[in-house]
Image (cartoon, rainbow, N blue to C red):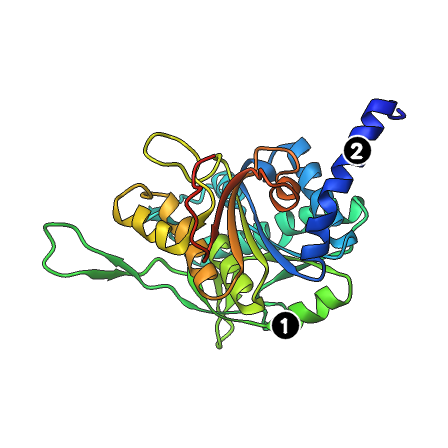
Amino acid sequence: MPLTRKQALNTAEVLSTAVPYIQQFAGKTIVIKYGGNAMTDEKLKQSFARDIVMMKLIGLNPIVVHGGGPQIGSLLEQLNIKSHFINGMRVTDSKTMDVVEMVLGGLVNKEIVGLINQNGGKAIGLTGKDGNLLQATKLKVKHKTPDMAATEIIDIGHVGEVQSVNKELLDMLTNSDYIPVIAPIGVDKNGTSYNINADLVAGKVAEVLQAEKLILLTNIAGLMDKQGVVLTGLSTSQVDELIEDGTIHGGMLPKIGCALSAVKAGVNSAHIIDGRVEHSCLLEIFTDEGVGTLITNEESTDTAT
């Protein structure tokens, strides 16, 4: 259906206001962690794919890192393999790791690649095992309760953390007009596979590439204060204070910690955005308002939206 004159004028105005942002970010790398509702809602999936394709077409270099926890849980349930969690992390034995690789490296990764390609992009799917993209080490989980005399180390199986990222491989792909789509599976020097938190992978990739932005899609409006107001324009020191006073707690701590670490390591800015909003990535990058929480090293007094 053709646009009305009013719709066409609105479209032209939107494109015009985005020009300064396009000029500012041309040639820069944007690392996006893709998960949550944006990954399961059909309309949001198409919206995300088009956002990524548009970024590439106008000169940015997007790199997608995806999760897949619900999909893993669903297949484990179908296979009658019980899931156990410690400190929010899935205990991953050899059978579970096989399912993780099947879901993340196969089903989920290829679906995202297909969506981007169907919308005119040139996506290529990778796990950390491809080209030694993600070298991993086994994650040591510390556990202590008030009645314990000392902290214990718990073995949660094939769960790892990133030791190194193959920057040369990612540079080669982005310079060749490809869009890397990374499943968070790492491998150690002995060839053992590890399931790694996708936020942590995205953060480390952003750090190694000294990305312009790290974007973490979530199922909430952003980081909120104790009154439920979304905070943005935060400096790393302000975020440290919010952690100290308990405003940031629970499940948000690892995500904020990932964003904080990336910015402190040289990433220009980190964004925790609402993936339930259509075209949330474009709104965050190309508008003043944005749709979430912005964290930089710059001091700012404007923190509420």
Circle 1 or circle 2, nearest the eye: 2
Residue at (58% x, 62% y) in the render: 211
Q: Quadrant of residue 140?
A: bottom left
Circles 1 and 2 in contact, beta carbons < 8 Å: no
Alpha carbon distance from label 1 to label 2: 42 Å
Task: Relative to 50, say whether 198 is above or below.
Answer: below
Residue 228 as seen in the image, left or right of residue 7: left
Q: Decide if residue 122 is in sight here.
A: yes
Q: Does dot 2 land on a helix, a strand or a loop?
A: helix
Q: Which residue is mark 1?
A: 131
Residue 288 as seen in the image, left or right of residue 218: right
Front residue (pair 267, 167): 267
Residue at (74% x, 54% y) in the render: 56
Q: Residues within 10 Å of mark 2 (few under 14, many from 20)?
A: few
Residue 110 position in % (x across, y down): 68, 51
Residue 97 image label? none
Residue 249 position in % (x across, y down): 31, 43
Front residue (pair 303, 185): 303
Residue 241 as seen in the image, left or right of residue 168: left
In the picture, which quadrant includes the N terminus? Answer: top right
Task: Relative to 43, say whether 201 is above or below.
Answer: below
Sequence-wise, which precedes: disc 1 or disc 2?
A: 2
Residue 58 position in % (x across, y down): 77, 52
Q: Does dot 1 land on a helix, a strand or a loop?
A: helix
Residue at (48% x, 69% y) in the render: 192
Task: Relative to 111, say whether 209 is above or below.
Answer: below
Front residue (pair 291, 299): 299
Q: Quadrant of residue 228?
A: top left
Q: Which residue is mark 2?
A: 11
**In the image as oriented, which residue stretches furthest toward the bottom?**
189
Q: At label 1, which amino acid type do we have?
A: Gly
